[in-house]
Image: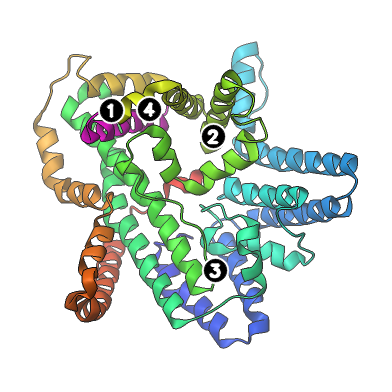
Amino acid sequence: MVFSNLVFLFMFLPIVLAAYFLLPKMFKNFVLLLASLIFYAWGEPKYVILMLFSILMNYLFGLMVHKYRNQLKHKKMVIALSVIANIGLLGYYKYSNFFIENLNNVFGLNISNEPLPLPIGISFFTFQAMSYVIDVYRRDAAVQTNVFDLALYIALFPQLVAGPIVRYNTVAEEIKKRVHSIELFSEGVRRFIIGLSKKVLIANPMGELADTLFAMNPGDMSSGTAWLGIIAYTLQIYFDFSGYSDMAIGLGKMFGFNFLENFNYPYISRSVSEFWRRWHISLSSWFRDYVYIPLGGNRKGPWKTYRNLLIVWTITGFWHGASWTFMAWGFYYGIIISLERLGLSKFLEKLWSPIQHVYVLLIVMIGWVFFRADSFDYSFNFIQTLFGMNGTQALDNSTFLYLNDYGYVFILGILFSMPVMDWLRKMLYRENSFIGRWAVPIVSPVVYMALLVFVTMFLVNSTYNPFIYFRF
């Protein structure tokens, strides 16, 4: 089930909200846990057992780490087993086909390679479970002795299948005791509608166009059409994932949880390093805290710092998918960020601000080509077409046809990838203006209701409604 599904919007969510707020406080966590298990089982019931196994396994690891908290040798052994078990579980379902295929190709073997369906959200709930045990080991979080409370943390449906990756210590108190208010609930509803609108009104149309153009042979399209394709994908992946994160944060607020932000307008960045401080913040901070810093971070000299960056970014790419193109995408960012550390960032700071933005957008869009394409051949051919290096036309009729059909979505996407609403809100509420105090509170509910109506119309009339990050 996805948040932009009519069944979720008009059946599942209303029923869960009604049960949650009508039943006494002692049953609220039970309602959320049951709803989360139903939500996950809706698409693939058999994998609920896998998630429950992961929960029980990490619950026991947490107890063992706590038991041996004063015996360093035993504690290290338990945490090592915990990491191996979690990575092994994730690796079996996500990477076993990749490794078998490459062993067969390199050594001429014929190992049976039956494709394994990828359990939805396994990367996210595995990382959350690992972070809990590691935080107990580091004494950054208290051990959870109630297995149902830990199950709620890992399985909580707003962030279960596509993040953001929530740290246990940020919600531990809210699992035990949450504050509910009309103001927080209303804020959650507004945030959810914004995320839903991002997803349905911008990401979906851009995704349809990106899928159409990336299905073409790069040699058969003009440079202009290729640019439309990569810009469409650039907007799709941002509004798809940031929209999902907005919906997750909004749902969390409805139930009394305050999840940390996951996106902060990454496309306005002036450096690639800044871009990754703004994009998928929960994943970037996870790799920083649990991989980069344990490797030594930047504390052991410049060369080991660059080594650590390349390792972390290559792993980050591999986390996104079992493919050499994903690894190359991660390594690509490792190189760029290393170059910025070496002095490129100081050079960029001296440039005119728009040039800094263009630099980031070009780097990011070239990276998205490798992220979106299925092979290196396609990626390189597509990039050649982008820059007119394979003899294709600069523009053709199809470029203008696609612009005619999708031009308004491109405008909306580019506009709302910038903090336009933040600027508008500041302007309206500046100096306690009459509009900000009286008109906005009256008009705002009408705008949100109109957005919900538009979204519903789009969903009723369209069958295209994927979530990109579900497959990661």
Which labelled disc corresponds to residue 257?
Answer: 3
Q: CA distance from mark 2 to mark 4?
A: 22 Å
Marks 1/4: CA–CA distance:
9 Å
Task: Determine whether, in the image, residue 451 is placed left or right of residue 112.
Answer: left
Q: Which residue range is magenta in the image?
A: 350-374
- Where residue 459 appears, x then y in whole percent? 31, 62
Q: CA distance from mark 2 to mark 3?
A: 28 Å
Which label lies toward us, 1 or 3? 1
Sequence-earlier tag: 1 or 2 = 2
Q: Residue at x 38, y 56 (%)?
A: 243
Q: Earlier in the sequence, mark 1 or mark 3?
A: 3
Residue 316 numbered tag: 2
Q: Which label lies toward us, 2 or 3? A: 3
SS for callout 1: loop
- Near-viewer residue (243 or 120): 243
Mark 2 or 4: the one toward you: 4
Give the x, y percent position of residue 454: 24, 67
Q: Is residue 43 magenta?
A: no
- In three-dimensional space, the C-alpha distance between marks 3 and 4, rounded to whole angstroms, equals 38 Å
Q: Is residue 117 visible?
A: no
Q: Are marks 2 and 3 in contact (CB under 8 Å)?
A: no
Identify the residue position indicated by label 4 in the image: 345
- Give the residue type that dot 1 points to: Lys
Q: Secondary structure at mark 3?
A: loop
